[in-house]
Image: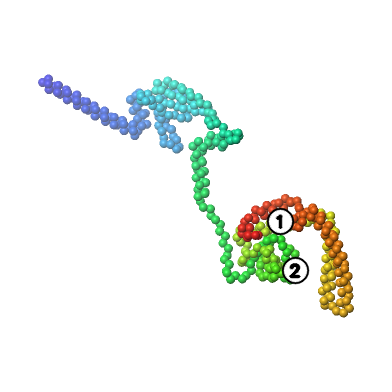
Amino acid sequence: MSYNNSNVNISYIVSSIIKTIIFIVIVGVILYLFKTYQPDSYNKYIYSLITGKKINVVASNMSTQTTQNIIEADSESENNFDIVEPIEKADDKKVSVASVSTSSKRKVVNIVEENNSPIKIEASEEIQPPVSNTSPKFIDGYEVITIEDTEPAELSSNSSSSRKNNNAGVKKIEAQQASPQQEIVYVEPAIPDDYDGPNWAVVAINTEIYNKENKKLGSILGGIVVETNGHIFKKNATLIQCFQIKDGVVNKDVEFYIKESDLVMFRGPYTTQIHPDKTTIIDFCTLRGKYQSLLDDLRKEEIKKNPHYSEYQEAVAAYKNLKNESDELEEKRKTTSGAAKANLEDKIHKLKLKEVTARKTLNDAQRKYDSWRNANLGSGEDIKITPTPELNKLKREMDALYPRANEICPGI
C-alpha cells in the first residue's frame, strides 16, 4: 500500500514538473514574441513589472534615418545633449546611459549608472589646426611651399570631402573631354567645271590702277574686294579688268585694271557668306594696306625734313613742265607743214635748250638731296622712321594673321 502511494507521489511530481516546464516555455515564447514585435510596450509594462524599475522611452526622429528607440535611466541628471548613445557593459547586469556634449573647444562625456549616481568624466580636447609633420622642402637653398602647405584642412587631399569633390571634378572634366566637339563645316556652292562667269579677287597690296588704254589712274588700297571679268596685256604684265565690290554690291560704273600679280584671285562669283579662310585673306590684305599707307606717310614726313627737299621738288617740277611742253610740240609738228611747222621746230629747239639746263639743275639738286637722305635716312625704301603706336598695332595684328594667310596662299 505504501509502495503504491509512493508511486502516485512520484507520478504527481513528474507531472507537475512537466506542466511547469511547458508553462514556462509558453510564457517565454509569448514574452519573446511580445518583446520582438512590441518593444515599446514590452519595455514600458513587462520590463518595469518584472524588474520594478521605471523606464522612459525616447524616440529620436531623424529626417534621413530610421527611428531609433533609446532607453534612458530615470534620473535628475542632465538630459539635453547633442548625442545620446546607449552603452551596455560586458556583464549585462547593469544598464548605463552615456551622453556626449560637444563644444568648439572641449568634449564632455557623462555616464549615468542604474543607481542614479552620475559619474562625470571630462575630456578636454583643444582643437588645434593641423600641423604638418613633414620638414620644409628646399631646392637650391630656397624653401619650396607647395599647395598642400597652404590649403585649408577641409580642402586637403587627405579629407574625404576633398577627395569626393576632386573625384567629381575629374569625372566632369573627363566627361567634357570624352564628348566630341562638333566641328563647324562650311560648304560653298559647287562651281561647274565649264563655269565662264565673273570671278572675284582681293587686292593683295597697295598698288596702281590703269584704264583700258594702259594709263595710270591712281592707286588702290590692299584688301579691297573686286569682281574680275576680262584682261588685257601691258608689256610683260597682265592687267585684270576689275569692278569694286562694296557691301556685296558690284559697282559696274567704274572700270579699272590691276596687275594680275597684285591680286589674290578666287574662282566663282562673290558671295557675302564666304569660307573663313577667304575672310582671313581679306583681313590680312586690309591690314597690310593700312600698314603700308601709314608707313608711306611716316616716310614722307621724314623726307620733308631734308634741307634740300624744296629745291629738289622745284627742279623736278620745272624739268617735267619743259619736257611735257616739248613732247606736245613734237606731236603737233607731225601733222603740220609749211611755215607753221617751221615755227614749231624753232620753239621745240629753244625748249630743248631750256630742258638741258633744267636737267642739269635737277641733277645738282638731286645730288645734294640724295647725299643728305642717304646719310640721315638710308637709301631706297629703307628709310629710318620712328614707329608710332598705331603702326606697331597694325604690325602685330598683321603678323598674327600672316602664318594662316601664307598657308592658304603661299607667298602672299
Q: Which kind of residue does numbered mark 2 sit on?
A: Lys
Instruction: Name the residue located 53 percent from the left edge and 55 percent from the top edge.
Output: 182
Instruction: Name the residue located 76 percent from the left edge and 53 percent from the top edge.
Output: 384
Instruction: Name the residue located 13 percent from the left edge and 21 percent from the top edge.
Output: 5
Residue 119 occupies which quadrant of the picture? top left
Vertically, is 195 above or below 403?
A: below
Q: Residue furthest left?
A: 1
Residue 293 occupies which quadrant of the picture? bottom right
Q: CA distance from mark 1 to mark 2?
A: 27 Å
Q: Which mark is residue 291?
A: 1
| Left or right position of 104 against 224 | left
* In front of the other: 125 or 362: 362
> Is label 2 in a helix, a strand or a loop?
loop
Please provide percent x and percent y for residue 185: 56, 58
Q: Is residue 18 visible?
A: yes
Instruction: Name the residue located 53 percent from the left edge and 28 percent from the top edge.
Output: 127
Count of labels in the image = 2
> Is label 1 in a helix, a strand or a loop?
helix
| Left or right position of 321 against 213 | right
Please provide percent x and percent y for residue 316: 83, 62
Q: Which residue is mark 2?
A: 215
Q: Is residue 56 visible?
A: no
Q: Quadrant of the N terminus?
A: top left
Q: Residues within 10 Å of mark 1 (few under 14, many from 20)?
A: many
* In front of the other: 379 or 317: 379
Q: Considering only order in the chain, which callout, 2 or 1, is on the residue closer to the N terminus?
A: 2
